């Protein structure tokens, strides 16, 4: 049995299944050489691949040259678009397409400048180019199959499998079309050069040029060119096949030459066969050898309504209207313009559309050449369509399913294998446009397939998103777990937890507070309670006052029961009262309380040493001290109440001041019937006046007017008490000294009042008024004959010695920067100590 190559060498041919013999009508256009039409003023260059596999390289307003690339490819299926002439890009917009639907497509509108200025084409010697360089030049030139399919040539020239047979299609079986015929006649040598380039890329074992027997001039021209071909003898030959439509189809030509059928859904390369058109071979030679891109092609302009039919070199993008106009066509309004031949071509709905790379013919038939559209009748099931189908399909079943829009069933009958040759429509006695039904069905199936692809892509993106979110979640969880493990490891290696450390500090603080409370005496506890009440926040002021009053009451009760010395009680309660004025400074209040407790303990110790020798004197002194403590307690309560009144309402403060003034007048009137007070009493009065003046220092910060009124009232009360008419001469002298001291200290206090807090100033003013009242009352008491109250002249003791048992704490509660006030306080304390020592020495002498 002969092999395929041996059969090819013998020229064996196989019969084509189906097919028809329509009138050729090629003589209208093939009798004259290929001509050229004048350039159009405007070119329409569709760029449908932009956005999918290409991007635009120009913008509106750019000037381009002939052969300049307008797009840049991004994928393998990319077909480059070039400027067919020089001019300006006037618009990039949607324009009607060269398609039966005339659907708009993105188009570059090029306004020609008439100069036809071209770029410098890069001419190369083919022997100096590598295989990759040749394929690159073909791809950059944008060469597609010029037989009508417009499949990218660089893809067919780079197959994945080995190629045994290269078929050059010069059949051109479609009626009226003669573009390939004239091209082979006039450019046979260039076509052979292109075939040699393709042979070098594919390296096939055989090359066959197939031409129909109705083209004798083309066969002769190609044979002459073949004699001078550089390919090995016997590897290339020309095969002449019988004229029959559609023997020029790719799969049909393979069947005729080799006897093999391309399986459904397969491509010829899978059989080791590649098919190229003679026009494609010519364009490959132009691109590789001359560097010229595909910017023009030969177009057959023919038909009964064309005055000058023929073949022309037409730039791509030329409007069909311009081609018809230059061919002498005059539109009548009822003309039919067909792109392609009468069998496989399609009618244009409008002629202002561009010429494409696959447009090989513009046909305008006359009324005698084409019958008017006939009314479609019912199918009679004659079977003629099945007999002439070159693809051995069942056109009848395809028609039924396509008409019923049962596209899945139509696909089951291999609808996609239909080459749309039109043989079935040509022989149908019912005038059914079968090919039109098939085209609509194919478009619907394609659209559905694209939608499914988009849905699948969306599903893939959704799944990828879910996976990404899940991966991010797992990563976060792993990161958190790693951080927790790291913290646990760090804690186990010796570092303490911050929470545990804070809890330990709190427990230690509570334990320290408990130990301090266990070692505190009852009077210190009472003083501490008063201190804590004093330093409470402003929002809890009333509770603080109540707590301080309770503490004083407990201290009085303890003194009455004899459990603690009366002197300690007096000092503690007086200190607590004084500390009530320092609620704005917790630290100062605590320091003052501590000093007061220390002084109380010291006074109690001194009192205990003299208790054995002077029992009666001690009782008298205790009674006097108890009275003084009671009075101090009552006055302290009044001072706290006055302080609360001043801080709450200024009007109440003025009322309290008026009440104190009335009480002071009453005390002054009562002093007329009392004996003269002793020098110690005068000293006590002076000390109280000194305390009052110190209170005035804290009386005016924000509420300066009220503080000044309170200070003035206190000074008036002190002067009035000192100038009592019923006092003896010594008392008068002491009162004068007291008045002078009071006035001096008061004047100093007035200068210092502006630096203290307003609320503390009001409280200090109230305390000063209360103590002034106490001093006036003390000056009115009769002189005691006890040894402790022995009269001493005012000149024989220091001015600061006139101090009572009540220790004022104002020096400790003043701001740290008040050095003058601190010195006064220290002097007062030193005078008190000296007075106590003198009193003790006097008792021992007695």
Image (cartoon, helix red, strand yellow):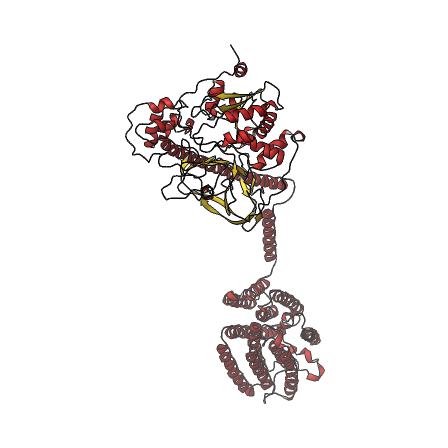
| Quarter placement of the C terminus | bottom right
Residue closest to the far bottom:
725
Where does residue 197 sit, x and y in percent of width and height? 60, 28
Extreme residue toward the top, this view:
1
What residue do we see at 66% from left, 67% from top?
602
Q: Is residue 181 left or right of 68 when viewed as pictured?
A: left
Residue 819 showing in the rendered view: yes
Quadrant assignment, res 130: top right
| Residue 355 on image: x %, y % | 48, 40
- Residue at image position (32%, 31%) is 432
Question: Which residue is found at the position 57% from the left and 34% from the top?
Answer: 139
607 w.r.t. 60: above or below:
below
Q: Is residue 69 above or below residue 134?
A: below
Q: Position of residue 542 (x, y in %)?
A: 50, 67
Between residue 174 and residue 92, name the one nearer to us: 174
* Number of numbered discs visible in the structure rendering: 0
**Is residue 154 visible from the viewing direction of this image?**
no
In-front residue for pair 211/597: 211
Figure quadrant of residue 803: bottom right
User: Looking at the picture, how far across and down is residue 527, in whole percent?
Assistant: 58, 65
Q: Is residue 424 left or right of residue 763?
A: left
Q: Judge by depth and name the residue closer to the eye, 160 or 58.
A: 58
- In the image shown, does 477 or 430 lie closer to the viewer? 430
Say above or below: 369 vs 843.
above
């Amino acid at each position: 049995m002969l092999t395929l190559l041996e059969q090819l060498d013998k020229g064996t041919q196989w019969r084509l299944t189906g097919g028809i013999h329509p009138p050729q009508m090629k003589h209208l256009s093939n009798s004259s050489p290929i001509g050229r039409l004048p350039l159009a003023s405007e070119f329409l260059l569709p760029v449908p691949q932009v956005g999918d596999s290409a991007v635009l390289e120009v913008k509106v307003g750019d000037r381009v040259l002939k052969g300049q690339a307008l797009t840049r490819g991004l994928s393998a299926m990319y077909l480059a678009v070039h400027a067919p002439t020089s001019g300006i890009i006037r618009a990039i917009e949607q324009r009607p397409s060269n398609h039966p639907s005339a659907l708009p497509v993105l188009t570059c509108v090029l306004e020609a400048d008439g100069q036809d200025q071209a770029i410098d084409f890069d001419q190369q010697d083919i022997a100096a180019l590598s295989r990759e360089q040749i394929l690159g030049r073909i791809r950059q030139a944008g060469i597609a199959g010029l037989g009508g399919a417009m499949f990218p040539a660089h893809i067919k020239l780079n197959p994945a499998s080995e190629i045994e047979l290269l078929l050059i299609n010069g059949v051109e079986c479609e009626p009226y079309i003669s573009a390939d015929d004239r091209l082979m006649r006039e450019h046979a040598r260039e076509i052979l050069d292109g075939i040699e380039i393709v042979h070098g890329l594919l390296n096939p074992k055989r090359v066959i040029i197939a031409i129909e027997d109705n083209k004798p001039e083309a066969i002769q021209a190609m044979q002459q060119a073949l004699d001078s071909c550089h390919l090995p003898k016997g590897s290339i030959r020309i095969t002449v096949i019988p004229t029959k439509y559609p023997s020029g189809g790719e799969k049909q030509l393979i069947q005729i030459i080799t006897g093999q059928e391309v399986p459904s859904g397969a491509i010829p390369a899978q059989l080791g066969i590649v098919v190229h058109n003679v026009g494609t071979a010519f364009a490959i030679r132009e691109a590789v050898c001359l560097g010229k891109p595909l910017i023009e092609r030969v177009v057959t302009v023919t038909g009964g309504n064309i005055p000058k039919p023929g073949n022309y070199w037409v730039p791509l993008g030329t409007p069909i209207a311009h081609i018809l106009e230059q061919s002498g066509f005059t539109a009548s309004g009822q003309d039919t313009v067909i792109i392609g031949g009468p069998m496989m071509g399609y009618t244009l709905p409008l002629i202002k559309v561009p010429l494409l790379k696959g447009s090989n013919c513009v046909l305008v038939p006359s009324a005698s050449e084409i019958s008017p559209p006939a009314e479609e009748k019912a199918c009679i099931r004659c079977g003629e369509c099945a007999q002439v189908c070159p693809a051995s399909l069942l056109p009848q079943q395809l028609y039924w399913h396509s008409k019923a829009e049962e596209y899945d069933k139509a696909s089951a009958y291999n609808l996609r294998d239909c080459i749309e040759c039109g043989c079935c429509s040509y022989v149908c006695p019912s005038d059914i446009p079968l090919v039109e039904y098939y085209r609509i069905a194919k478009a619907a199936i394609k659209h559905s397939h694209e939608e499914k692809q988009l849905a699948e892509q969306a599903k893939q993106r959704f799944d990828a998103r879910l996976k990404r979110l899940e991966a991010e979640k797992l990563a976060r969880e792993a990161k958190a777990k790693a951080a927790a493990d790291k913290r646990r490891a760090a804690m186990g290696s010796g570092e303490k937890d911050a929470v545990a450390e804070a809890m330990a500090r709190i427990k230690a603080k509570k334990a320290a507070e408990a130990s301090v409370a266990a070692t505190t005496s009852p009077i210190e506890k009472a003083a501490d309670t008063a201190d804590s009440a004093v330093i409470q926040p402003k929002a809890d002021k009333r509770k603080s006052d109540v707590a301080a009053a309770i503490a004083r009451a407990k201290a009085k009760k303890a003194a009455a029961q004899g459990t603690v010395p009366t002197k300690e009680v007096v000092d503690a309660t007086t200190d607590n009262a004084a500390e009530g004025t320092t609620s704005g400074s917790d630290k100062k209040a605590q320091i003052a309380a501590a000093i007061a407790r220390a002084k109380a303990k010291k006074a109690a110790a001194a009192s205990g040493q003299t208790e054995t020798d002077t029992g009666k004197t001690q009782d008298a002194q205790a009674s006097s001290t108890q009275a003084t403590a009671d009075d101090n307690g009552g006055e302290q309560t009044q001072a706290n109440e006055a302080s609360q009144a001043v801080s709450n309402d200024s009007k109440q403060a003025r009322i309290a001041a008026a009440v104190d003034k009335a009480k002071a007048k009453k005390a002054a009137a009562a002093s007329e019937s009392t004996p003269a007070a002793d020098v110690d009493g005068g000293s006590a009065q002076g000390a109280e006046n000194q305390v009052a003046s110190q209170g005035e220092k804290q009386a005016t910060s924000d509420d300066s007017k009220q503080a000044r009124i309170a200070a003035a009232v206190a000074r008036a009360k002190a002067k009035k008490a000192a100038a009592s008419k019923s006092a003896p001469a010594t008392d008068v002298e002491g009162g004068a000294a007291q008045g002078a001291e009071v006035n001096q200290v008061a004047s100093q206090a007035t200068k210092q009042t502006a630096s203290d807090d307003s609320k503390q100033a009001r409280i200090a003013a109230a305390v000063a008024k209360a103590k002034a009242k106490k001093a006036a009352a003390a000056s009115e008491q009769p002189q005691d004959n006890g040894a402790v109250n022995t009269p001493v002249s005012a000149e024989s003791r220091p001015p600061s010695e006139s101090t009572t048992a009540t220790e004022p704490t104002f020096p400790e509660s003043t701001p740290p920067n008040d050095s003058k006030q601190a010195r006064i306080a220290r002097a007062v304390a030193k005078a008190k100590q000296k007075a106590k020592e003198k009193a003790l020495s006097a008792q021992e002498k007695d």
